[in-house]
Amino acid sequence: MIRCVLFDLDGTLVHFEYDDFLNEYFRAVTNTVAPLIEPRRFTGALVAATEAMIRDLNPSRLNSQVFVDDFFKRVNVSEDVLMPVFEEFYMTEFTKLRNVLGVQPHPKAREILAFLLHEGYDVVIATNAVFPLEAIEERMRWGGIAELPYNLITCYDTMHFCKPNLEYYEETLRIVGHEPEECLMVGNNVDEDIIAGALGLKTYLVEDFLLDSGANKCAPDFRSDFSELAEFVLSGKVQTL
Ligand SMILES: [Mg+2]
């Protein structure tokens, strides 16, 4: 019986092309720090530190620690100077990406989350834990799904692993106290989201913004566009799994 539903955020609950988002995010953050760090050096450090964070499987180091340690080895600006600039960025320039990308809430997104919470399911925002919480909550506002009583929002300040590592899902389930077979993972990325099936979670692939490198042979238990997912949830199908 399913007791917990985990949702990916980008391209699943919040509707935009992830590549477009990354391009605009990189452009905006690079401009913001340009007075302090030469743009090519900055983007190189950002990519390398993000990759280091995604690869790292040390259970005693938070994702944010791995990122910061790797990043500041690559740039000649101190953490004390740059971290407040990043924090300011997420409260100002980052919020403008919503209009740049033209993100509109899906009319059913909030409804299915509120429905599941009302029905007593635990609900997790299982977005890849590579961003600070503020940047995740901002994207949740873009999708009209902020400020619901979620059990967990995975972010880089609190998690020790990233997708597509199964350790990310093991840690997430440990925090919310569920066994894999009690969980349904909903996402648009075969490599990062549907991989959860390898641990025993049920999986639902949302195909509106489908991402699939072809590397992961895990087949989803269910697949459809977002509107059909909404029907699936609102007609009580999760109770029958
Ligand atoms: Mg996604």
Image (spheres, rainbow, N blue to C red):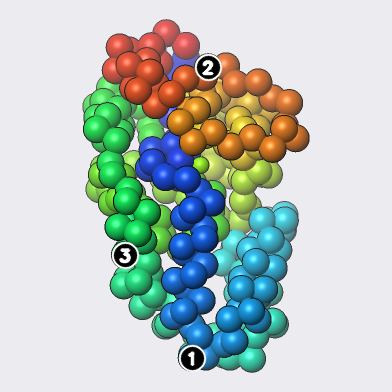
Q: Residue at x 48, y 91 (%)?
A: 35
Residues at marks 1 and 3 touching, judged by CB atoms closer than 8 Å: no
List the residue tagged with mark 2. Answer: 222
**Lower position in the chain sequence, tag 2 or tag 3:** 3
224 on left or right of 111: right
**Lower position in the chain sequence, tag 1 or tag 3:** 1
List the residue tagged with mark 3. Answer: 96
> In the rendering, at what x and y percent does residue 120 appear?
30, 25
Depth order, front residue of 65/34:
34
> In the rendering, at what x and y percent does residue 145 appear?
28, 43
Depth order, front residue of 21/114:
21
Q: Secondary structure at mark 1?
A: loop
List the residue tagged with mark 1. Answer: 35
Depth order, front residue of 191/157:
191
122 on left or right of 53: left
Q: Residue at x 32, y 12 (%)?
A: 236
> In the rendering, at what x and y percent does residue 113 appear?
31, 32
Q: Of the residues tagged 1 and 2, which is closer to the observer?
A: 1
47 on left or right of 124: right
